[in-house]
Amino acid sequence: MSVRTPAGRTTAALAATALTALLLVGCGQDDDPSVATPSAASTSAAPPSVTASTPTAGATPSAAASTPAVDREITVTIAKRRVDPPTGRITVGKGELIRITVTSDVSDELHVHGYDLGARLPAGTPGLVEFRADKTGLFEVETHETELVLFQLVVR
């Protein structure tokens, strides 16, 4: 991916830094093996495509236009501790490019178990996680501070 504007490069650098910090910190909770049981590690030599960010006022349309088309877009809104759409299972195919966008009325942190991905959720501002679903299994997508299960991602 090539980012040509200074604002786009800054946004990309901040997103990469935030993702690295989240990966280093980890979840801090024990994962229930019955919930997130991915299959054997991918044999692909290329790492999965991952993006985690929150939109900024300085982002330009050209930076967003260079993003590949996603196979599945999942949008969740949290208001007064209520998840919309209601918590359930979402099934996707292995290899699909997934984009999860979450907007919360309180500051929080989004986490995708099994893939160890996350994004900050500033109050009222959408947080975004984008990745290639290269592991099969059942994975919880949750918030950390409010401990809400947003949905369970089933990758087949």
Image: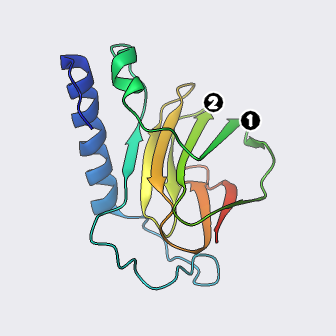
**Image position, residue 119 (x, y; %):** 44, 45
Q: Above or below — where is 100 with respect to 3?
A: below
Q: Secondary structure at mark 1?
A: loop
Report crowding for label 2: few under 14, some 14 to 19, many 20 or more residues within 10 A (C-alpha): some
Please state which of residues 156 and 82 is positioned toward the viewer in this rendering. 156
The residue beneath circle 2 is 105
Q: Residue at x 63, y 30 (%)?
A: 105
Quarter of the rendering occupied by the C terminus: bottom right
Q: Residue at x 26, y 23 (%)?
A: 8
Q: Amino acid at mark 2?
A: Asp
**Image position, residue 15 (x, y; %):** 31, 38
Q: Above or below — where is 96 with respect to 16?
A: below
Please state which of residues 117 and 27 is positioned toward the viewer in this rendering. 117
**Image position, residue 84 (x, y; %):** 77, 40
Q: Residue at x 20, y 22 (%)?
A: 4
State if disc 2 and disc 1 touch (CB < 8 Å): yes
Q: Quadrant of residue 34?
A: bottom right
